[in-house]
Image (spheres, grey):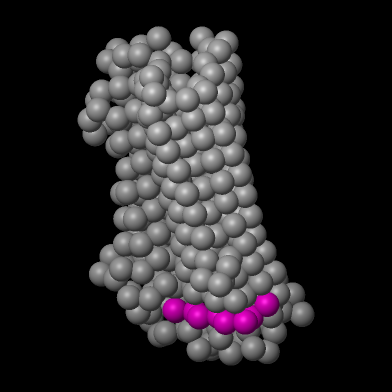
Amino acid sequence: MYRLFPLSVMMISAASSGCYAKPIDPQSNNGVEESADPAGVRDSTKAFAGALKRSPSIKLPCGTYRMNLELTNANNISFEGSGSCTIFKPANPTLPVISITSTNFSEFKSFSIIGDLRGSASGIFVKSSGNTMFSKIMVSGFRGAGVQCVGGTGSSGIKVTESYLLDNVEAGISYENCQDFFIRENNIGKNNEFGILLKNSSAGQIVSNYIWENGVAISASGIYYDWFSKNRLTQSKREGFKCEDCAYINISDNQSYQNSTSGKGVYDEWKFRYSRNMIFSNNILYDWTATPHVRYGISIDKTSSKIIVDNNIFENQYIAPFLVDQSAEKITIKDNQ
């Protein structure tokens, strides 16, 4: 389902396949015509901001643009590139390339963002916004997260789909106090700390993502009513999935394998603390190597309760499939292989 390409290959492929300026919708602005610099020399922030004031819809041709675009109360925005050949870089490396606040019902799609590790910012920063989608983008090389959402007075319905989040320091995707979210069909790899980091973010769907070679594939705390399904978690330095204070969540039909690469036998494939009212079913946990990587397929500590673990496949090369503290209450384990 997924194919991985090095960043350089992605860029060369885009440039050599005829990725030139798309026909401009007569109802949309072309940012280049608004004096944006496609050579990436001048700061194009004012050009894009001015274009969006005149029209909520912009379509951009290929090129490299420097900007730190900040949008506030700018609803119903459509900001579209021509694919990976439309590249944004920070004009000021201490600020996000795209920052939106109190912005709703908007879409940002079909472009690449390349970071500058001299700064500490995330590539995309979302605050107090809702029902906004980031799709078919690539964000790489930031000290923060590729995409960062924080609640502020409330963020909900923020979607990241069909995108590449690669080589960021903190996380590929970070959500804190962001609700009713969607993270779907993304390729999230080689982020130093976390592939996906969730804090106090509930009623979300994390579905069909390929999450590979991160510090921890998915780390969650204080989450409720979230659904994790059909994800592939592989070759993390530490855990594949680590959850603390998680309740009423469903984890089903995922694959995880060969995690704990930085300390074989030290970390667990799936680890739960202070978690309750949870279903863990129809997952496949395996390791194709002769030496098992993780300590346990799933570990549940004494502070957890009311967890059902059923119909999972635990590959027999694990040291042991389960570590369940005897003090944990109402843990049901059945029909696993």
Q: Residue at x 24, y 34 (%)?
A: 262
Where 164 falls versus 86 (above or below)? above
Q: Residue at x 67, y 64 (%)?
A: 131
Q: Could you say which is closer to the camera, residue 88 or residue 147?
A: 147
Residue 219 appears in view: yes
Q: Residue furthest left?
A: 263
- Check if residue 74 falls in the magenta segment: yes
Please state the extent of the stretch shown in magenta in the rendering. Answer: 67-75
Q: Residue at x 59, y 39 (%)?
A: 248
Where 133 falls versus 68 (above or below)? above
Residue 9 appears in view: no
Q: Could you say which is closer to the camera, residue 115 or residue 17?
A: 115
Give the left or right position of residue 201, taking residue 76 as reference: left
Where is residue 9? Give x, y as percent: 42, 49
Count all numbered tags in the image, as a single digit: 0
Where 302 falls versus 181 (above or below)? above
- Check if residue 318 falls in the magenta segment: no
Q: Residue at x 40, y 85 (%)?
A: 42
Where 128 falls versus 71 (above or below)? above
Where is residue 212? Give x, y as percent: 41, 38
Q: Could you say which is closer to the camera, residue 307 or residue 229?
A: 307
Where is residue 118? Give x, y as percent: 25, 69
Q: Quadrant of the N terminus?
A: top right
